Amino acid sequence: MPADVLNLVDGQARPAASGEWLAKLRPADGLPLCRVARSGAADVDAAVAAARAAQEAWAGFTPVSRGDLVREIALALRGRREELSAVVVEETGKPEALALGETEAVVEMGLFMAGEGRRSYGRTMTATMEHRTVLTVRQPVGVAGLVISFNTPLPNVAWKVFPSIFCGNGAVLKPSEETPLSALRFAEIAHDVGLPAGVLNVVQGLGQEAGAALVEHPGVDLVSFTGSASTGRWIAETAGRRLAKVCLELGGKNALVVCDDADLENAVHWAVQSSFSNAGQRCAAASRIVVFDEVYETFRDRFVAAAEGFADAGPVISEASLDRILAALARARDAGASVLCGGQRLDREGWWLAPTVVQGAAREAEISCTELFGPVTILYRVGDLEEALAVVNDSPYGLTSAIHTASMHRAMRFAENAEAGVVVVNGGTHGSEPHMGFGGVKQSGNGWREPGVEALDVYSEWKYVNLITDPAKA
Ligand code: NAD
C-alpha cells in the first residue's frame, strides 16, 4: 500500500490542489492505512476539463475498438486480481475470498461490456412516408460524474466505468473516501493498457467536498451515483436544477419471506448469507426476514444458531458506521424490540459487530423503515402470504426481495406483487450478475438499471436517424 493515495487527472497522478489529506484507517484493526488527497472544487474543475478535452476524440473511435479496449482492461485486471483483492481487503476488512469473488465479477463485467462492441444493436423502423427509413444509433452523453459507495469497491467502479468508457464518454470518478486506492488502481491499469489520458479521471475526497463539487459542476452532463437515498435525493435536486441526466442506485430494506412449505435448511442458509455476508453492507442485503407462524419458532432457532456460527461477516467500514448502528439498536430496544444474538461491539480492535438478529420490532418502528447497512436483520411473524406481501411492501425502499416456498402459485403471486426491482425464489436477496439489469423502485432508485445492456441507456442517448432515400419520390 502506498502511504499517499492521489488523484488521477489527465493521466497524471496529482495531490489535491489544496495540499490537504484525509486519514484512512483499516476497519479490521483501526490502524492507519494511508493518506488520501482531500480534493475540492479546483481538482474537480481540472478533472472535468480533462474529461471534456479527451471525450470527443474518444467518441471518434468505433464501438468495436472501444469494446476491444474494455476487454484489454478486463484482462489486465484479471492478471492482477490477487493484488487488487488484497487492496480491497486492506481498505474494507472483508474476507479474502469475498474480495477475490468481487474482482472476478469485475472481470466478467468488463468482458460482457466488451462484447457490446459487436452487439450494440439499434432498431430500424417503418414509416408512413414512402422511401423513408428510420434507424437508431447511440450517442455518448458527454462528461459523466461517477460517485460511488465503499461496499463492493471494485464492482462499484466497474459497473459505471466500463459502460461509460464503452459508450464514448469522458468521466470523473469520485470513489468513496473509505476505498480510494482500489479505484485508483483500476484507473491506472486502464491507462497502462491504452485508455487515452483524460477519458477516466479520479478525484479523491469527501462527499460534501469533492463529491458535491462534481455534482454541482456545470460541465458534468450525467451524474451516476451509487449510495444512500439521502445523498441521492440531494444529488437529484442539485443536478436536476440544470437538467443534467441523473442515475441513482440507492439503498434497500430488503425482505426475505419464509413460507410454511419452505425447505427450511435452504431458507436458513440464504437468510444468513443475505443478512450477514459483507457485514450486511450490501444494498441487496436482507434486513427483514418475514416468517409464517407455523414455522416461526423452528426457523428462528435455526437461524439464530446459524447467525451465531457465521464467521465470515468482516467488520463494518468505520467507527462512525458502527456507532450509528449501535445507537439504532439501542433505540429499537427502548421501543420494545429484543436482540436475539449479536448487538454488541466485539471485544477486539477495529469495527466489529457480531451478526445481529432482532425480534419484536413494530412494522412502523424506526429500525423497520431505516437502512442500517450493517449485519443486522429483523424477524417478523405473519399468518399468510397476503400478510407477508403487506409487510414486504410496507417500506420506503423497493430494491430486492426473496421468497422461500415449494408452491409455484405463491412464488408467482409474490413475483407479481412484491414492490422491488429484483425477486428471487428460493435463494438470497443478492446475487445478480453482470448481464442482469439491477435497480429498484420507490426510494431505491430513480428508474435506471445497471449493469446489463440496460446500463447502455444510462451512458448513451438514442438518436433517431431519418433517411429519405429517394427525395424526388417522397
Ligand atoms: P453515501 O451516500 O454516504 O456515499 C456514497 C458516495 O457519495 C461516497 O463516495 C460519498 O463520498 C459521496 N457523497 C456523500 N455526500 C455527497 C454529496 N453531498 N455530494 C456528492 N457526493 C456525496 O453512501 P455510503 O455510505 O457510501 O453507501 C451506502 C449506501 O449505498 C447504502 O444506502 C447502500 O444501500 C447504497 N448502495 C446502493 C447500491 C445499488 O446498486 N443500489 C449499491 C451499493 C450501495
Image (tube, rainbow, N blue to C red):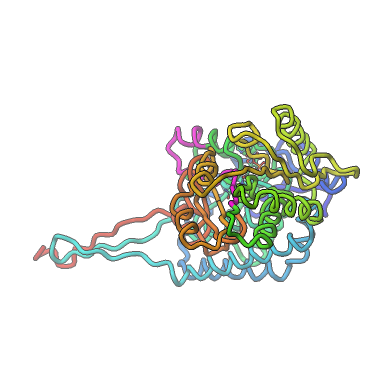
- In the picture shown, does residue 407 fall above or below 383? below
Foreground: 5 or 383?
383
The spot of residue 272 in percent (x, y) is: 71, 54
Q: Where the N terminus falls, by quadrant?
A: bottom right
Quadrant where the C terminus sits is bottom left
Which residue lies at the image location 74% right of the left edge and 67% below the top edge? 80
Q: Is residue 172 left or right of residue 334?
A: left
Q: Is residue 173 in view? A: no
Q: Magenta span covers which residues? A: 236-257
Could you say which quadrant of the image residue 337 lies in? top right
Q: Nearer the viewer, residue 389 or 158?
A: 389
Where on the picture, by quarter, is residue 192? bottom right
Viewer-proximal residue among 424 and 197: 424
Q: Is residue 248 magenta?
A: yes
Instruction: Determine the residue positioned at 83% across, 47% down.
Output: 26
- Residue found at the very far top of the displayed protein: 334
Judge left or right: residue 219 versus residue 45.
Answer: left
Look at 69% across and 44% down and name the residue there.
Answer: 377
Residue 333 x/y as whole percent: 74, 31
Q: Residue furthest right?
A: 348
Q: Position of residue 114 (x, y in %)?
A: 53, 68
Q: Residue furthest left?
A: 473
**How many tags in the picture?**
0
Q: Depth check: 452 or 126 in front?
A: 452
